[in-house]
Image: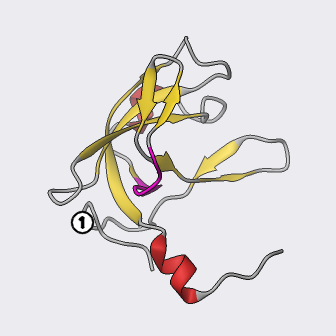
Amino acid sequence: MELISWDDFERVEMRVGTIIAAEEFPEARNPAYKLQVDFGAEIGVKKSSARITDLYRPEELVGRQVIGVVNFPVKQIGPTRSECLVTGLYRQDGTVVLAVPDKPVENGARLG
């Protein structure tokens, strides 16, 4: 494991946002959903592709808060531009569990 400095950590903008739209992403190479996440007035709504289809359905994602990295470069995934990385944790079987706050917080709140 490589050690990083506090300055390195502070450069990663991890913010809380609320999923406002979730839909199937059939064009993706691996099963995924297209998400729209509202990160508050300062950052706005960002799109993401998330490989979380094993444990979640689109209709149960809308309204959930998630933690996302909002300062990665845009990544083209098929016909969609992913503007943020919705974070999750890998289980032993390879499925992804979303990283979420355990109590509601204001959209845009920074992890740190």
Q: Where on the picture, by quarter, is residue 15?
A: bottom left
The residue at the far front in this view is 73
Question: Circle 1 sits on which residue?
Answer: 106
Residue 3 is inside the magenta segment: no
Question: Residue 22 at what x, y percent from top left?
Answer: 39, 28
User: Which stretch did the figure color magenta?
Assistant: 66-73
Question: Residue 79 at what x, y percent from top left?
Answer: 46, 16
Identified by mark 1, the residue type is Glu
Question: Residue 17 at what x, y percent from top left?
Answer: 33, 54
**Residue at 40% across, 27% down:** 59
**Residue at 48% across, 59% down:** 100
The residue at the far top in this view is 26
Compared with 68, 112 (above or below) is: below
Q: Nearer the viewer, residue 30 or 94?
A: 30
Where disc 1 sits, the SS reads loop
Q: Quadrant of the N terminus?
A: bottom right
The residue at the far bottom in this view is 6
**Residue at 47% across, 79% down:** 10
**Residue at 55% across, 58% down:** 99
- In the image, taking residue 29 as reference, residue 109 lies left or right, namely left
Question: Residue 14 at what x, y percent from top left?
Answer: 44, 65
